[in-house]
């Protein structure tokens, strides 16, 4: 029965991941999410400084949970104060990071380009967005959604559980 439970625990997140990566654009009806996302390519992840230390197999697994998106110049990708928590890796193009103070005055904080990423604060902390990020030219990004990351983390935990279980079975002489 334990094997069935572990199998179900691994299968359910995979089904949910497929739904999360395919259906995320339909939830908001927002124009920048209207086109179906392309899957991320493992080679793109390995080329990005944030993930360059992954093995090819790790990049292949992570790529299943990410989507590739092209965003038109002038589009605000994330808004300060929003509750979403997606992480974006820039493949091509440039984006401007702007923050508003309490008085509503906006100031530019940075210009980001290929190899840079944004959205990590909300992604890691589950807090609101701390700044606006807008495409200042056509932007190609790899997007990792919070829901997909949670599923990926669950799969990693299930994999670790399997490794520990197999090791313990070897210790008691029940495994190969």
Image (spheres, helix red, strand yellow):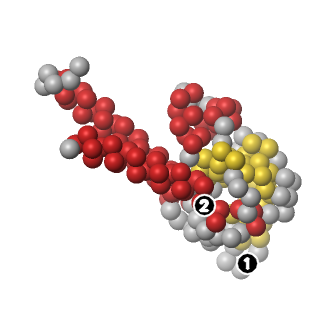
Residue at position x 71%, y 69% in the image: 30
Residue at position x 31%, y 31% in the image: 163
Residue tagged by mark 1?
A: 104
Residue ranking furthest to the left: 172
Mark 2 secondary-structure assignment: helix
Which mark sits nearer the N-terminus, 2 or 1? 2
Reply above or below: 159 against 56.
below
Where in the figure is residue 85, as x and y percent of width and height? 57, 60
Residue at position x 57%, y 42% in the image: 64
Quarter of the image for the C terminus: give it: top left
Residue 80 visible, this orientation: no
Mark 1 secondary-structure assignment: loop
Where in the figure is residue 109, as x and y percent of width and height? 75, 58
Disc 2 or disc 1, which is closer to the eye? 2
Query: In the picture, residue 172 is in which quadrant?
Result: top left
Residue tagged by mark 2?
A: 24
Number of labelled discs?
2
How far apart, in angstroms, are the residues tagged by discs 2 and 1? 31 Å
Dot 1: within a 10 Å radius of its alpha carbon, few (fewer than 14), some, or many (20 or more) residues?
few
């Amino acid at each position: 029965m334990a094997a069935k439970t572990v199998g179900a625990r691994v299968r359910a997140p995979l089904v949910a991941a497929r739904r999360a990566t395919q259906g995320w654009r339909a939830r908001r009806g927002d124009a920048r999410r209207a086109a179906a996302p392309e899957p991320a390519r493992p080679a793109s992840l390995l080329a990005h400084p944030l993930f360059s230390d992954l093995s090819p197999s790790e990049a292949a697994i992570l790529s299943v949970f990410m989507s590739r998106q092209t965003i038109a110049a002038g589009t605000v990708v994330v808004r300060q104060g929003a509750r979403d928590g997606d992480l974006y890796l820039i493949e091509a193009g440039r984006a401007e990071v702007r923050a508003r103070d309490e008085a509503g005055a906006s100031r530019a904080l940075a210009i980001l380009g290929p190899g840079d990423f944004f959205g990590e604060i909300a992604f890691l902390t589950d807090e609101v967005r701390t700044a606006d990020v807008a495409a200042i030219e056509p932007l190609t990004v790899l997007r990792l959604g919070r829901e997909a990351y949670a599923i990926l983390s669950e799969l990693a935990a299930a994999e670790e559980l399997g490794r520990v279980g197999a090791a313990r079975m070897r210790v008691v002489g029940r495994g190969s």
